[in-house]
Each structure stands twice: as structure tokens, then as C-alpha cells.
Amino acid sequence: MVMTDLESKAWSTLSEVEDPEIPVISVVDLGIVRTVEEKDGKLHVAITPTYSGCPATQVIEDSVVEALRKSGLEPFDVKTVLSPCWSTHMISEFGKQKLKDYGIAPPADDSTDKMALMGEERQIICPNCGSNNTLMVSQFGSTPCKAHFKCKDCLEPFDYFKCL
Amino acid sequence: MSDNTHRLNVALHLGDNALILGHRISEWCGHGPVLEQDIAMTNIALDLIGQAKMYLDYAAELEGKGNDHDHLAYKRDVLDFKNLLIAEIPNGDFADTIARQFCFDQWHFLLLQELSNSDDPRLKEIAQKSLKEVTYHKRWSSEWVVRLGDGTEESKEKIQRAIDDIWYYTGEAFIPAEYEKGILPENLNDAWMQSVKAVLEEATLEMPTDEWMQDGGKTGVHTEHLGFILAEMQFLPRAYPDATW
Ligand SMILES: [Zn+2]
């Protein structure tokens, strides 16, 4: 499908909107912006929450609205959709690299967390030194989307963006 | 009652479970036994309250009075709440909280698995989203049952007593209310028993044998505890209607 000028302008505007809790990754790279469609001269933007109770959801919606307005993209509407539900697969490769540079271990593939749910050891790489000699301290971290790890080599604690 | 009324009651029941239990667990915020577990409980509370919002938004739409989730959470009275009694039982000590959470999570997980294939598209998408979160909850509470049960003499005694105490609130989930028939899955009891038994065995704990079960919550007959929760939760929005930040 070919993107209209308005749609591509909206995408590039939204790729400047940062996640309020991890301000190095855009809401587009996080996979929160699901669709942007122009219909009868109006833009329809759909966003999806990461975790159901993520307190950032409202802030993100407000920032999206504000950014679209500032770029002169009115008229538009922004609605929240639940399906298909957000998954860490929706984070772009660029986004994963950004997370890592920021000191958050990006989500490993699904099988890693499934293994963990089955009680097996998983290998999460320390974003500080690259060691895989790491230990999960708690599967619940500083925000709903993260688990708390520590590195047994460089001894630094770090956040891991857990698979969902 | 029409199908729409049944559906509305189901959405309220599911939303109220998540809201009331979420509110309960959030009482641990700042009081957890260690920082990591304080954060874990706060995270679980947040997930549940987020899930409550989705169900109550659906309920508000079905109700068709132009209300939203906040109205349903803050402006209804005790008799209108349809949560399971287990969700409103006080936190007690850490073992009591774990026992309550464990019994609830085991049921919640099975329920959401089934609801993920519901022919009601809204319940289906909410269940699919919630299931991912509840998978983590169930793992956390099950791990703690094992850790406390197979821990010290004192921790074992505390978690066994906690499991025994909560037991007669665990059956209500499997006694269908009139409104849920044909909408919520039936016959989850055996799967729940099996799953609970496996964890209790690993934890070297005894499975309670009492068969008498307390019910009432689903139809608005609550314990004395719910009123106190609502008094705290609803005070601000009732005292200052439509207040904003
Ligand atoms: Zn390291």
C-alpha cells in the first residue's frame, strides 16, 4: 500500500515523540503507534498500550496529539486499540539498539522468556559489559515492562525489557 | 434479563475482581518485606487496575448511559460490586497475601486462557492482553508458595495456615452466577485443583480438604471488608466530584 504524503508526514512527526519513561526511544520504534491512515482528508491514528496498567499510556496519547497538532496535521483522531495486543516483537531493531545503548537489556526472543517461565535458566546479556554471566534479581522491575537483573562480572545492576 | 444485561454483569464482575484485588495489593506499596517484592506487588496491582479499566470501559459502553470506567469504579455502592469475595479479603501478613494471590492467579490464568477464544470480541481482546501479564503474576505467587512452604519451619507454618484460611473463599469462582452462563467458561475447577495441587506438593504443603465454600460476591453479597475498601477508594472522587489535577 502506498503511503499518502499526509501519512508519511505523520509517521515522521511521531518518530520524534519519545517514550516518557525511556526518553531515547520513540513511540514508533516501541511499536506503540499501530496504524496511521488518511481517509476523506482526515488522519486516523491508532495506538496501543504496552502493559494494561502502564501509567505512561495517557502521557503518550497526549504527546501524540500534541505532536500531530504542532505539525499542522489537523484534522485527526487518535484512538487506543487493544488488538492485536502489544508484544515486544513490535519493537524495531533500531529501537532495541537504542534500549541497549541506554543501558536497558533489550527483550530476548520469546523462547528465552518461555524457558524462564518454565523455570529454566535464561541468558540475558549485560548491556554494560556484554557478559552473559547475569542473574535475575526480580522479574518485576522499575516499570511494568522491565525485570531487574545484575551482572556477576561487572557487578552493575541493570533493567531488562521483558518479553510480553 | 437480556443478553446485554448478562454481558454487562460479566464485564462488571471481571472488572471488579481486578479493581478490588488490585486495590488490596496496592496497600503493600511502601510496606513490602523487601524492596524487590514491594515493587513486584505494586507492579501486579498496576496490571490489575489497568485490566479493570478495560473491563469497566466495556461495561460502561454496554450500560449505555454515557459513563466511563471512573464512574463505575467510584460511584457505585457495595451492593453493586460483583467481585469474588477472595479479592476483598484483607492482606494479613505476607503469607496471607501470597496464599490469596496464588489461589486467585491460578484461577485467573485458566479463565483468561479460555476467554482468549471468547466469541465476544471485547472480552477476547482484553483476555489476550491480560493473559500475558497474569502469566507473570501466577509464576511469582507460585514461586513464593514453594519458597515459603519449602522454607523454614516458621515460613512453612505461616503459609500452610494462610492457605487453610483462604481456602473456603476459593470455591466461589467455580459456582456460576446466572449472568455468566454461556459467556464465561465452565468447568475450570478440575484444572484449578490439579494445578494448585502440583504447586502445594512441590511446596511440601497439605492441600486443604474442606469442601464447604462461601459465595455471594458475584451477586453483591459481600464481606464487611468491601465497604472499608470503597470508603477509602471512593472518598476523594465523592467528596470532590470531577476534580482534576
Ligand atoms: Zn556487566
Image (cartoon, coloured by chain):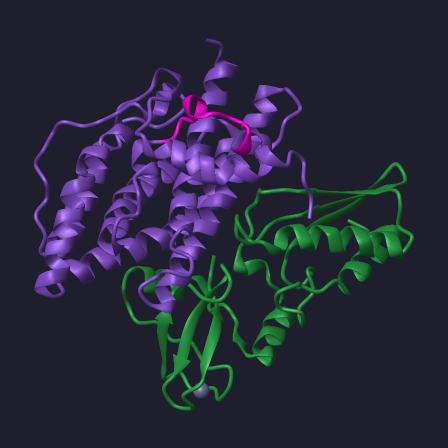
Q: Which of A98 and B210 lies nearest the eye of the viewer?
A: B210
Instruction: Assess whether residue B76 is covered by the magenta stretch.
Output: yes
Who's the residue at 26% across and 25% down the image? B215
Q: Which of A164 and B74 lies nearest the eye of the viewer?
A: B74
Give the drawing colour for chain A. Answer: green
Q: Is residue A162 shown above or below B94?
A: below
Q: Quadrant of residue A99?
A: bottom right
Q: Is residue B117 visible?
A: no
Q: Quadrant of residue B189?
A: top left
- Relative placement, left or right, of B179 versus A28 is left
Q: Which residues are magenta?
A: B74-83
Who's the residue at 33% across and 31% down the image? B84
Q: Position of residue A109 (x, y in %)?
A: 46, 66
Q: Is residue B79 visible?
A: yes
Chain ID for purple: B
Chief secondary structure of the magenta span? loop
Q: Position of residue B37 (x, y in %)?
A: 35, 63
Q: Position of residue A21 (x, y in %)?
A: 61, 65
Q: Is residue B75 shown above or below A75?
A: above
Q: Position of residue B231 (x, y in %)?
A: 46, 35
Who's the residue at 63% across and 20% down the image? B64
Question: Ligand 1 sits in which quadrant?
Answer: bottom left
